[in-house]
Image (spheres, rainbow, N blue to C red):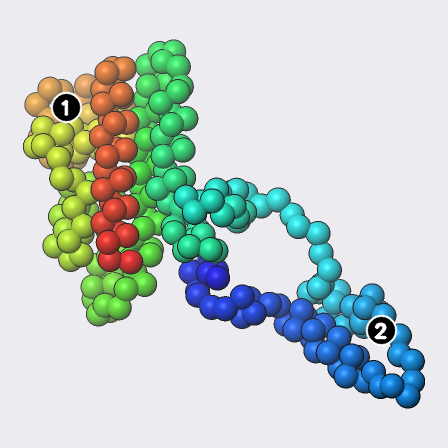
């Protein structure tokens, strides 16, 4: 079995709580006290109630719905707090599954105007960053020097070209194995998300410097078309799959 949060692997009995182990020992001792000379009644409910930590760490509890119910490719179903985790049965990370579910929702959103297109763009980029940051956290578990771990921890996936170059050099993960035109488009789109989020969509010097975009001018308010959003969704999906495939190849 595997812990869905940290990925720790162990036999099933390593995941028992301290109180469950106390209960097991108490039941064992009760059975060992049985002899042919006398009649013994073993009250399991009484054993549970007498456990010293039963109030703060109860052995008997009802299952509670958590925040993310996942059906893994291995067909195991599990429920965790937060979004990302490991399958307790096969240990597959659910990052790509969560990412593609989010993109699918964005793809189904109706195009009702410029504000909606901008919102889809922002969410699309944010969803990729969520996937990338989760995989980066898993990659940090790989043994490395303190300097390399610090560099990996500080990767900014908003700067998608730089992030890909670093991962390709350090870990042979190339999630931008795309055409030059597609890379340019993605770099502009990721930087436009920053403008739409923090600058009301108005082009500034930083945007022009980071993208080399000659289709807009300083101070211009950006707009985005439905075709651009569809293209972005498709390319980001490819990026996510490439990143996850690279992660799995070394994890």
Q: Are marks 2 and 1 in contact (CB under 8 Å)?
A: no
Q: Residues within 10 Å of mark 1 (few under 14, many from 20)?
A: few
Of tags 2 and 1, the one toward the viewer is: 2
For disc 2, the marked residue is 42
- Foreground residue, 228 or 104? 104
Residue 40 seen in the current view: yes
Q: Residues within 10 Å of mark 2 (few under 14, many from 20)?
A: few
Residue 52 in percent (x, y) is at 75, 74
Q: Quadrant of residue 206?
A: top left
For disc 1, the marked residue is 218
Residue 72 in percent (x, y) is at 44, 45
Secondary element type, mark 2:
loop
Residue 73 in percent (x, y) is at 41, 44
Between discs 2 and 1, the one toward the N terminus: 2
Q: Residue at x 75, y 65 (%)?
A: 55
Residue 77, compared with residue 50, is above or below; it is: above
What label sits on residue 230 in the rendered view?
none
The residue lying furthest to the bottom in this view is 37
Q: Quadrant of residue 184?
A: top left
């Amino acid at each position: 079995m595997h812990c869905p949060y940290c990925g720790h692997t162990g036999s099933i009995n390593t995941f028992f709580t301290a109180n469950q182990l106390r209960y097991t020992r108490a039941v064992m001792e009760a059975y060992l006290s049985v002899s042919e000379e006398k009649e013994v009644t073993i009250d399991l409910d009484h054993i549970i109630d007498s456990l010293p930590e039963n109030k703060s760490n109860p052995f008997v509890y009802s299952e509670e719905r958590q925040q993310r119910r996942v059906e893994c490719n291995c067909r195991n179903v599990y429920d965790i707090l937060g979004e990302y985790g490991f399958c307790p049965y096969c240990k597959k990370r659910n990052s790509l599954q969560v990412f593609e579910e989010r993109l699918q929702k964005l793809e189904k959103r109706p195009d009702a105007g410029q504000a909606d297109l901008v919102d889809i763009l922002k969410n699309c980029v944010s969803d990729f960053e969520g996937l990338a940051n989760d995989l980066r956290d898993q990659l940090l578990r790989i043994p490395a020097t303190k300097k390399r771990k610090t560099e990996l921890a500080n990767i900014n996936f908003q700067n998608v070209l730089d992030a890909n170059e670093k991962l390709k050099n350090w870990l042979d993960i190339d999630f931008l194995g795309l055409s030059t035109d597609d890379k340019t488009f993605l770099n502009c789109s990721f930087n436009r998300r920053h403008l739409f989020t923090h600058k009301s969509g108005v082009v500034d010097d930083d945007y022009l410097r980071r993208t080399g975009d000659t289709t807009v001018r300083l101070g211009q308010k950006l707009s985005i078309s439905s075709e651009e959003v569809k293209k972005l969704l498709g390319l980001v999906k490819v990026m996510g799959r490439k990143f996850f495939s690279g992660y799995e190849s070394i994890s």
